[in-house]
Structure formats: C-alpha cells, structure tokens
Amino acid sequence: MSRSTTDGRADAVSARVRRLQRAVQEASPGVCAERALIWTAYFRDRSTAPLPTEVRMAQALSRVLLEKSVHIYDDELIVGNFTSKRVAGAIYPELHGVAMLANPSSFPTRAVNPLQISPDEAARLKAIRGFWLRRSIPYLAYREPWRKVRLIVDQLKPRYYALNELGGIAHIVPDYEMLLELGTDGLVARAHEAREGFAPTSPQIEFLDAVETAANGLAAFAERYAHEAARLAATEDDPLRRGELLEIAETCRRVPREPARTFAEAVQSLTFAQISITLESLDNGVSPGRLDQLLWPFYQRDVAAGTLTRERARELVAAFCIKLCEVIPVFSDATTKLHGGLMSGQAVTLGGVDVTGRDATTELSHLFLEVIDALRMRQPNLHVRLHRSSPQSFTDQIAAMLCDGANTPALYNDDAIVSALVERGCDEGDALGFAICGCVEPVVPGATFGSTDAALFNLPIILELALNEGRRFSSRWRVGARTPPVTEMRTMHDVTAAFETQLAHVVARMVGDLHAVESANMRFHPTPMTSMLLRGCLERGTCSTAGGARYNSSGVQCVGPADTGDSLAAIERSVFVDRRVTLPQLVAALKANLDDRDLFAYLRGLGKFGNDDALVDRYTAYVLERFSSELARHRSRRDGPYVAGVYSMTTHAHFGSVTGALPNGRLASACFASGLSPENGMDREGPTAVFNSVNRVDTRSLSNGVNLNVLFDQATLRGANGRRVLSSLVRTYFRGGGMQVQTNILDPAVLIEARADPSAHPNLLVRISGYSAYFNDLTPTMKDEIIRRTAHSGTAT
Amino acid sequence: MGTVVVDEVVVVDVQRFSLHDGPGIRTTVFLKGCPLRCLWCQNPEAVRRGPEIAVYAERCEHSGRCGEVCPEGAIRLGALARVDFDRCSACGACARECAHDAIRLIGRRVNIDELEGDLLRDLAFFEDSGGGVTFSGGEPMVQAPALGSLLARLSGRGVHTAIETCGLFPWSRMAPLLTSLDLVYFDVKHMDSAVHRRLTGLGNELILANFARLANSPVELVARMPVVPGFNDDEENVRATADLLHTHGLTRIHLLGYHGLGEAKKPHLDSPLAPFHLATMERRDLEKFASRFEERGIDVTIYD
Ligand code: SF4
Ligand code: SF4
C-alpha cells in the first residue's frame, strides 16, 4: 500500500489531488463575513418578524444559501463552499459569534490562530454588533438581568464548568443515508405526509413548513453550482476539464434534490448537506458518520457496472476530505483556550459491525484509510471501530499507519461502546450501528440529537471546595455547599462525603444554566435543516432543539478525573495511612501552594493513576462513577439524559489555570491530566500499566466517550515487530474493556524543533484530544504539554 | 548480610513493556548480584548481591531527615548529605525518608509470591503478544533457587520465560530450571580465557562448558556479545566466537554495542568497579563489525 512519493512507491492519490491539497494547505485561514451579514439582513427585516421562528430560521438559511458567493476552484471534482474564501470560518452572530464582533479587525494580528479578514469585512461585521448584542443566545438564556450578567461573566472565564452549548449545538451525525435515498424532494414529501397527524395551525405544522423551506433551500444551493459549472465549461479551453465541469453541472442539477444514483452523486449530495447544516447549526462536530457503509452500495454498483474505477473513487474521497478542511471554526481568544487548534470536528467513522453484529469492514474502509493516510490533513477526524472479528488486513493497515506516525485514526472498541449506549437506553440494533460524533462521542447516527459537547466540568475544583467548606482556597466567599471544616473530618469517608455534596451542588447549578440555554436554543435557534436529517423529528413534527429526535442526550465532559482521584488517594495515604500530615495541615499547605518543598516532593512521589496500582486507581474510578451518577439524576429540557464523557479538548490547561494546588502535588494553576490519561509524566510503568489502570474505570456509564492518549516514540514501534506490538497492546486493552485509545507516535526532538522554529515543520500534525491539529496552531502552553507527555519507549537493555 | 532465603529475591528493578529482551511484550526483572566484574559493566548497581545505597547528592535539599533516621549514624550532613558506606547497613530508612529522591535504596527484597503477582498483571499482554518475563541482572543465576521457583510458576501459567546470563554458574543450579525455561541469552564476552580473566576477573572455562550444555538442551539458546572496541573486537576473537557457534550448530548472534550509560551510575554508588572511559559505539561501526560475523554465515541482530 503506497503512502508517499518520497519513498519511491506510487502515490496513493493522484497529482490532481495533491494540487487540491496544496491549494488548501497554502491558503491562509480567514474569517468570512457572508453568513453573518446575510443572516443579519434577514432578521433586520421587520416584515418577517410575525413568522414562526422555525420558518424564519429556514428562510434565513435559504437566503444565505442563495446569496452567498459560489466558487468552483481549479481541479475540483466535488464542489461547494462553506465560505467565500478557500479556507475560512463563518461568524454566527446569534450564537457565540457575537463576542467576536467587538473588534473583528484584530483577527489578523492576534497571537494564537490569526485569521485573515479585509478591513471592509471587519467594518461591516463590527456594524452588526449592536443588532445582536441583545439577540444572541448567551444574552437570551436568562430573563433576569443579574442572571444574564452572571452567566456571561462566568462563561467568559469558566471556572467550574464551560457551557459550550451557549455558543451553539450542532454535533450531530445526520441521516445522510436517508438524504441519499430520498433526496430533498423525498424529504419534502415526507414532511407533507407528516402533516396529516397535526392540526393546521399547530406548532408541528409550522416546523414542517420550515423543513420544506430548508429542504428547497438546500436543493437550490446545489443548482447554483450547476449554473456556475456550466458557465465555466462554456469558456474552458481544456476539453478534459470542460467535460468534468459539464459532469459537475449535471450532478449538481440532480442532487441533492433527487436520490443519488452514483458514487459521485452520493459524495456530492452529502457535501452540500454538510455545508448547509454547518451554516445553519454551527461549524462544530457536524459528522458525516460511517461513510464506508453509506457509500458502499454506490461504490459496489458503479464498480460492477464499470463506471467507476478504484482510482476515481480515491480521487472523489480525497476531494471530499480536502473539502472538509476548507472550513475552520472561528473562536474568540477566550474560547481558543478551551478549544485550540482550529478543529471543526467533522468525524468519519470506519469499520466495526453492522446492525446485526456482523463485521462490516468493506473495501471502502481500506480506501478511506489509504486516502486519509496519504493526505494527513486536519480533517476529517478519523475514527475506527474495532471488534473481535475485524479483519486482520484492516488492523494491519491501521497499525502500519499509526506506527508510521500518522497519529490518526483513533481506535474504538465496539463491545465497550455498544454496552455503554445500551446502558443509556439505545436499542441494541441502533447501538451496534453507532458512529463517532466530533472528538470521541458515540451516537446512533441519523437519530441522535446528542449535544455531545454541551459542557465541560472542572472536577478537581470540587475537591478544593470540599476541603474549604465550599469556598475557594483564595476566597472567603462561599460558592459551593456548606460542608464541614477539615478540622472536623475524621475519616476518609468524611472527605468523600464533602466531595459528593459539593459535586451535587455544582452539577445542579450547571444543569440550571444548561436548562436556560436549552430553552433559549429551543425558542430562538431552532434548526429545521439539521432536524430534517434526524429520525424522529418529521414524525413528531418537532425540531431537534425541542427534543424531536429519536434519541436525545447532552454530553458533559469530566475534566481532571485523574488529578481528582490521585488527590483523594494522596489524602488517604498522607493523612490516614502514613499520618505524615493532618488534614488541616495539608489544606494549609495547599493554600500556600505547597511551598514546603519536602511535603511537595512527598505528595508528588505518592502513587498516581496510570501505574497499575489498584489502591490508587480505584479513586479515579470512584470520582468518575460519582460524576456520571450525579449527572444521571437530571434530565434536559429536551427530555434526554445528561451523559458523562471524559475528554478535555484543551480545557485541562484552562481549568488547571484557575484551580488551586491539589493534594496530588499539582501546584496551583498547573495543567491537569488530559482526558482519561494519567497525569503528565506520572505514568512511569509504561503503556501496559496505563491500560490496566484505565481498565479499572467502568466505562459503561461514560457513554459520551472517553479519550486516552498514549504517546510512543517512533523508535519503540519500529518495523514489523513494532506494528505487531501496537496491535497486540490495543487488542489486549480492548479485551480488558478499554473503550478508546489514540496514539501519538512522535519523535520529541521534532516537536522541540517545531516549538523553537514554527517554519521548520509547518504541517506537523499532533493529536490533541480526539482530534488532530497543526502543532503551530497550538498555544505555547499546549505545545509544552504535548512535549512533556510521557514518551513511552520500550525499555532496551 | 542476612541469610539467603529461597522464597525471596533481591530485585534492582522491574521494567514493564520491554521489547528487546525476547519475543513479544515482556517484563524484565533485574536481579542483584554478579560473579563477574567486567570493566565495561553497564549495570554497576546490580553487581553486589545485597541491597545498597545510591546517593544523588545534587538532588539533596538539606532537610536533614535522613540523618535523623539513620540507625548507624552513617550520614553526615555537610553542604550535601553524604553516606559513610563502611558504616551503612543498607537498611533503607534514609531512602524512605528522603522526599527528594536524593538517596535511593538499590535492591529490594521481594517475596516471590508478591513478585509473581506483580508480573502477572501483564499476563493478558504476554498471552496476546507471545511475550513473557525475562530475568536479567546482574547475573540472575546467582539467585538460582528462588529464580527456579519463579520460573516454574510463570511457566506453569503459560508465560514465556527467558534469562540473560553471563554463563558463570554451577551446572547443578541450571539443570532443575531447564523444564521451565524457554530461552537463554548467553553472553560470550571473550573466547580466550586469559583475556577473559583480565576483562572480567575470571576465566571462561566454566562459561564455555555451560554454553555447550545449554546448546545440547531443549532450551532455545541465543549468543549475545557485548562489543567493546579495543577489548574484544579483534579478528581472532571474532573467528573463535563464530567457530563456537558453528560447533554447536548455532547460526545467529546478538550484538550489543558499548554505551556509556553504566558509567553515569558509578559515581552515585560505592562501586567496586573502577571508572571506565570509552566512547559510546556508533551504529555504523557496529554494523561494520556485524558484517564480520555475517561473512561467516551468522545472522546478526544489532542492539544500539
Ligand atoms: S533526606 Fe534527602 S534531602 Fe533531606 S538531607 Fe537527606 S538526602 Fe538531603
Ligand atoms: S541505609 Fe540505613 S544505615 Fe545506610 S545510611 Fe541509610 S539509614 Fe543509614
């Protein structure tokens, strides 16, 4: 299997694909004002104000799709633009985008993730700020002014939890299967049928009206490309390209309005839907899902008919993947701290079993791997499902890719995920068909409104509250529950009881805020286009934001479980076993940021999660169990459960920066461990120990997915033996119950070089937390952290 | 130093996820004690049979705790903590007390039940990868009786077992181990007994006799040679080593190029070994050296 041209083997992708790739990689990312300006123009028009919100949303979206600029670039086979620029992100002024309207001209000069924008665009964006200040979701979530202020101020620099849902939801795996089968005309017909069950003036009918508008908008969007392709064809001198353009015109005239007939139509159809959903909901976690399943019938049919070669299929897949890299999320500086790396989270899932439990790996699964390996770009997020009968050719291909330093795909254990999904209430057949949404979150594709990234929760800060009667170490003001002073805590049980009380208190407060946000999204930001591609919404005549989808849930990520668990283990050991300090002494030392060097070194030296020590690991398992049970006590306004996930994006650095010293010896403001990984550099026993530790955590209650990063240096996994070792590690970890793992295989020297001189490795890709980012896009702290992550090297004699 | 207890071993270190001491994913156990005193010793901390103290004075933060707990009055606290090795009984109290890792106890007495349990934590990884446990050292055969029980238990659980030996042991100690041993890495340091004595302190007669016996046993035997430029890389020794392999029908050798990592450990120990100054061997020199075996029809695996 070929990977690159440099090693003398044939390139897995064509020269045309390399040209497309270069064009996208060389474009400097920018900000596109179009969506924001068209959206604003629509909502400024008072004449539409009497219409139901759903209908207005659908009309606004259609207007964007009809008015935004249309480009077909050289060499393109799959067309469609997310924005007006080659690589850019839109601003969503009614969502988190409002925060960026204050000073849009600073984008090109900001320190992290600078983005291009013309002075004219910046000025026009700035001019709409006044309109949105009182119309954006963060402002609308609460009615009472003091609550508005509290929520907005809280979320500018989140300390206890970060409410991502405040900035928009998205995060879905749309039902592209249905789109390909029915086309938008078929969906309109479905919406028509659904009307039968509802009274003429009911909200359901309003929603179904909105769906029709959205569906027609999507079809009309494609037709604009048909015109553009025909126009270009008319002036094209190269007969070959002219033929291609005419073919593109033909395809865009047909799909997505009608069912897709060919592989090319299928890819083109879902590309338009991918763009439109992104423009409606948000550019975050809009995940195409199991493309090796979805596209398989088309591929098979075309290849059998002799109308598609493997090479052409590879080009189309590559063109699609490159397309996904043309959109980036535009975040404010504050949000970049939580989600560094310009990651849009468009996840493709390969492999796994089908809904009957049989292996579903296809030739297309291999083809996708080959193409994505050859491209090594930041999108799509690539996820692979593995199970006991995954074909060896497939696992070998993955191992080869990972050992070669591709850092992608992330690997998922079908057994563990299916049981977690069943545990949270999914039908077994549905669960077997899961796809990964965004970073690591499993959902039933086409049927789940999962808001999988609803919030991130700072768990270690709960311990700070528990050790100080509900106050921060640095404050006399109580923010948590009233729990006993440490002078009255006699046993470990007293400590955990206080921890549980504080946890319940803060979770309840977070849920209160989430409820407000959910209601605001339901009332002010319904998403008919997204909803029409989620099973349940049409039948119920109800938008996904209002709970219309077959499955509803909200994912809340636990950040810092290892720090919290290790801290409890350290309290037990230092106070109740070794009796080296009393609890009040320990807390006094923490307030002084562990300036007693001896005590600091002693605490650092105590056992840590990730070293296969059952006594220590059980505390991490315990805090996660508590966290997920606490969430399970609440339900969302969409009547779905809150489900726990364990991945941290880059919030483990941010939450760390606002949290005091911890009994595990982590100093105030320092970074937490990432996701479910052990604390940085504290896993001293190698990867087998890490896997054993992690497998002490019961992942059945962590159905929003977990992220375990394991870094190996390249030398360890060299050659055929290295590939065998990696496969064996993963297989054994999964057999022991492991849910997910992603490897970073990296020579640390390369990173150190890249940190010193960003131009030395401009396209160096690293995995952050379920996603890949260019190293140069990361904040300095994140760069340091990636470098510090334990490099697991096999011990040589 | 205490009597030798058969259900206990003195362990320098246990390294999980070892990939270069045998097939598959392995755990390598470094046992303490060695009868040889090789000039280039790479594991000087494993030479003595019993536990000992290593001092990393640059880490000392002057807390004075070590001095307070030492039952022998062996610690003097000047600018940095210093241990009077003549007085020290290696009780380890200071190392336990030092939070800064400035004093370490090298060599833990570990009950074999406990060690077995620890090693079996990776059983699933061993099974899947065809890996297992390798005993190294020091010279693991120094602790042969306890080693034997460990090997028997591990092999009873289906774990692949290996040892790395310098070859110097009474055959009577090895014979009972053969049924629970899958693989032996056998060091061939020098073929000339007089030179061997000069380099390691003892002659090689018993070593070569043991090599022959193992070659005729059912256990897989792999010869290993530490390549120390200027000491054992001469043509005559290569020829003799190759002949030894041919005599026993063996066709492969593992070459370990000299590296200076062992030297860095000596200053922290009360080491019986003199300092040894030699540059770490370059991989290409090792490859060139390897070709001299390959010319003689021997497959070479290089460790650098
Ligand atoms: S206990 Fe450690 S830090 Fe303290 S004086 Fe002794 S060696 Fe130095
Ligand atoms: S090991 Fe024991 S005897 Fe030796 S210096 Fe330390 S405390 Fe003293």
Image: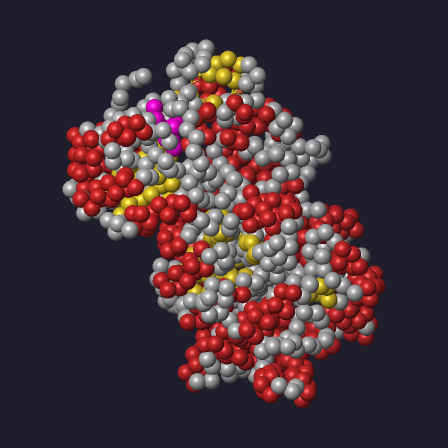
Instruction: Indicate whether A666 appears above or below B222.
Output: above
- Position of A427 with respect to A87 (left or right) is left
Q: Identify the residue at image location x=71%, y=33%.
A: A475
Residue A65 falls in image quadrant: bottom right
Q: Residue furthest front?
A: B235
Is residue B44 rendered magenta in the image? yes
SS majority, magenta: loop
Find residue A177 and report its horizontal and vertical position in percent: 51, 74
- Span shown in magenta: B41-48
Q: State the residue at coordinates (60%, 44%).
A: A784
Q: Residue at x 50, y 38 (%)?
A: A682
Quadrant of image for the N terminus of chain A:
bottom left
Q: Nearer the viewer, residue B232 or B179?
A: B232
**Which residue is more in the foreground, B82 or A670?**
B82
Query: x and y percent of residue A86 in the render?
Result: 67, 69
Q: Is residue A351 above or below residue A619?
A: below
Residue located 79% across and 65% down the image = A118
User: Which quadrant holds residue A22?
Assistant: bottom right
Query: In this view of the protein, can residue A370 be seen by the observer?
Result: yes
Asked if residue A737 shows in the view, the reply is: no
User: Residue A595 in magenta?
Assistant: no
